[in-house]
Amino acid sequence: MSTTVNAYSAAAADRPLAPTTIERRDPGPHDVVIDIAYAGICHSDIHTARGEWGRTSYPVVPGHEIAGTVAAVGSDVSRYAVGDRVGVGCFVDSCRECDACRQGLEQYCERGMIGTYNAVGRDGLPTQGGYSTAIVVDENYVCGIPDGLALDVAAPLLCAGITLYSPLRHWRAGPGTKVAVVGLGGLGHVGVKIAHAMGAEVTVLSQSLKKMEDGLRLGADHYFATSDPDTFRALRKNFDLILNTVSANLDMAKYLGMLKLDGTLVELGLPERPIEVPAFAVTAARRSLAGSNIGGIAETQEMLDFCAEHGIGAEIEVISADQINEAYERVVASDVRYRFVIDASTF
Ligand code: NAP
Ligand code: ZN
Ligand code: ZN
């Protein structure tokens, strides 16, 4: 009925991740069995493993930036065949019937998407993520990884890539638009690459100038340090679109002040505490404060195809499973250039 596979899990909020085994169901008619090659470390994995959002069911196997190869398929699977290179992102199912699901916006499923980990699957069992050697997922929630993209640099696109691609498309970034990316981390660095490939004028707003050379190489036209108060004066009413990827709370009035008339700041980071916004910061220039959550399956496929066409992968540091806890510390300290990816053969 199931297969035992190696994984890494957190047993409690204050415990380091440790080796374990988990059960993966035998493939149903529409299931794809994926041999995982690489799993990216998203900051959301850390928020969840450490219980920072207050709703983690332990033990939890994190990981929602999954790239691998199809090892077996169920009897009715039509989209994928054994040997195909595939990816899985932040969710593995949704109701498939609500307006959002019908529009291909499964991430906004009205009944709630089923997360790749820390959720309950249709079978009533907890879902467990990509820090493991294999995963079984319904074919409708699997994306194909184009030949031009190596699996290791593709893995982070399944969360970081789509989280930036979707708002860039929704708010129509392109030639003639000025886009700022706040935070040059896992999300931010792919955002810079994608926004540049879409033709936008891209500015990085980082805490310091330490990563400036990288930022410009990745495609930014401008780079500013937010630790310098002059930055906010120099860039007042400058941007059409600001994408905030920071995992901590920022002084939102200062960032909103950099939006032009009718500009939009899209909140992508998910800090523990609520965001505080003075009303004048939005009313002063008819500004919008918006949010965005990953992307649907069709858009994730579109993003992967776009990245392959433009030669975009994540900048990664490949680690073995026994380095996960150390990697978590480094992500929290903003000491990663720019995404840790775990070699799944080491689980
Ligand atoms: P990350 O790699 O840690 O990047 C976050 C970046 O924010 C850091 O590299 C740093 O960039 C900046 N930063 C960190 N602490 C800061 C502080 N105290 N003040 C100012 N800047 C700070 O994390 P990530 O994986 O990109 O994820 C970022 C956030 O997005 C997390 O909260 C995550 O849960 C969330 N997320 C949301 C979605 C979604 O769909 N909305 C999807 C995935 C992740 P600099 O060093 O350049 O300043
Ligand atoms: Zn993520
Ligand atoms: Zn739905």
Image (cartoon, rainbow, N blue to C red):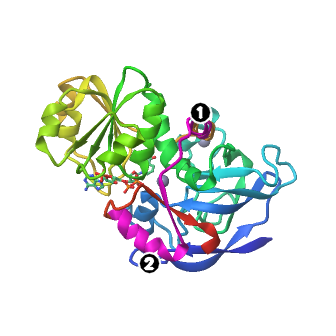
Q: Position of residue 105 (x, y in %)?
A: 57, 37
Q: Position of residue 104 (x, y in %)?
A: 61, 35
The answer to whether residue 251 is seen in the rendering is: yes
**Residue depicted at x 60% and y 41%:** 304
Quarter of the rendering containing residue 342:
bottom right
- Looking at the rendered image, the disc whose residue lies closer to the viewer, 2 or 1, is 2
Between 336 and 301, the residue placed more toward the observer is 336
Label 1 near label 2: C-beta < 8 Å? no
Queried whether the magenta region covers residue 312, the answer comes back as yes
- The amino acid marked with disc number 1 is Asp
Q: Is residue 134 above or below residue 280?
A: below
Mark carried by residue 16: 2
* Mark 1 element type: helix
Q: Quick one: label 1, few (<14), some, or many (20+) residues within 10 Å?
A: few
Q: Is residue 141 above or below residue 119?
A: above
Question: In which quadrant of the rendered image does the N terminus lie?
Answer: bottom right
Q: Is 25 or 329 nearer to us in this picture?
A: 329
For mark 2, does the 10 Å Cα neighbourhood hold few (<14), some (14 to 19), or many (20 or more) residues? some
- Is residue 9 rendered to the left or right of residue 85? left
Q: Is residue 175 magenta?
A: no
Quarter of the image containing the C terminus? bottom right
Residue receiving disc 1: 99
Determine whether 326 is above or below 288 in the image: below
Relative horizontal placement of residue 97, taking residue 318 as reference (left or right): right
Q: Residue at x 43, y 24 (%)?
A: 174
Q: Which residues are magenta?
A: 304-332
What amino acid type is highlighted by mark number 2?
Answer: Pro
Q: Is mark 1 within 8 Å of ligand 3?
A: yes
Secondary structure beneath label 2: loop
**Sequence-earlier tag: 2 or 1:** 2
Residue 4 locus on image (x, y percent): 72, 75
